[in-house]
Amino acid sequence: MGHGGDVIDELTTDHREVDDLFEKVQAAAPGSPERKRLMDQATIELVRHSVAEEQYLYPAVRRHIADGDAIADKEIADHSRVEQLLKALEGLDADAADFNDLVLKLKTEVTAHVHDEETTLFAQLRQACGKEDLYELGESVRRAKKMAPTRPHPSAPDTPPGNKLLAPGAGLVDRARDIVTGRGK
């Protein structure tokens, strides 16, 4: 899918791409290297997406939506649970005893989070922000994803300014590791 447009279009496109990756993971032979490769790709996409949301979307939610602090805090807590599952999966091969259970838990968490964002949060954001603001947020999210880490870092800050300061450095290190290991190809 092509990326672009406002923040809602950008993040919805990400959601569909992750849905597609989960389908491919489920379709891959259990225990296969392909299943692990696909899960690594899903991890890369989920981490980049989460970091960008935490840097730009949730601060906008806090500023523009009534009860935005509580909404943003809930979404960040969702991300934390997802990141813990991603970290647990990172060290496992696809033939590990708990790999499939963790993938199922991850998919359940991600699906619930996506449903909540798409049915509630995005509608509130579209009402609260002008088209230009939503487009600028989309541009910020796209830039953030290019610099974001590709591996889970559960102990890293998940709110500004800490996340905006540390994420690019972690992203650089992660991308270098990915090049050396061939991860994400």
Image: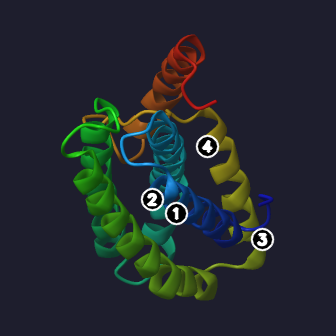
Residue 105 occupies quadrant: bottom left
- Give the CA distance from mark 2 to mark 3: 39 Å
Q: Is residue 154 visible?
A: no
Residue at numbered disc 2: 26
Residue at numbered disc 1: 23
Tell me the SS state at disc 1.
helix
* Image height of 118 relative to 148, above or below: below
Residue 36 occupies quadrant: top left
Tell me the SS state at disc 2.
helix
Q: Is residue 141 visible?
A: yes
Q: Give amino acid for label 3.
A: Glu
Q: Position of residue 132 (x, y in %)?
A: 78, 70
- Give the CA distance from mark 2 to mark 1: 5 Å
At label 3, counting other C-alpha atoms closer than 10 Å, the crowd grade (few under 14, some 14-19, many 20 or more) is few
Which mark's residue is nearer the viewer, 1 or 4? 1
Residue at point 31% right, 34% down?
156
Q: Position of residue 27 (x, y in %)?
A: 50, 58
Question: Are the residues tagged 2 and 1 within 8 Å (C-beta)?
Answer: yes
At label 1, counting other C-alpha atoms closer than 10 Å, the crowd grade (few under 14, some 14-19, many 20 or more) is few
* Image height of 174 relative to 4, above or below: above
Q: Give amino acid for label 4.
A: Lys
Q: Nearer the viewer, residue 101 or 66?
A: 101
Residue occupying the far top of the picture: 180
Q: Which mark is residue 132?
A: 3
Q: Give amino acid for label 1.
A: Glu
* Image height of 172 relative to 124, above or below: above
Q: Which tag, 2 or 3, sits closer to the chain's start?
A: 2
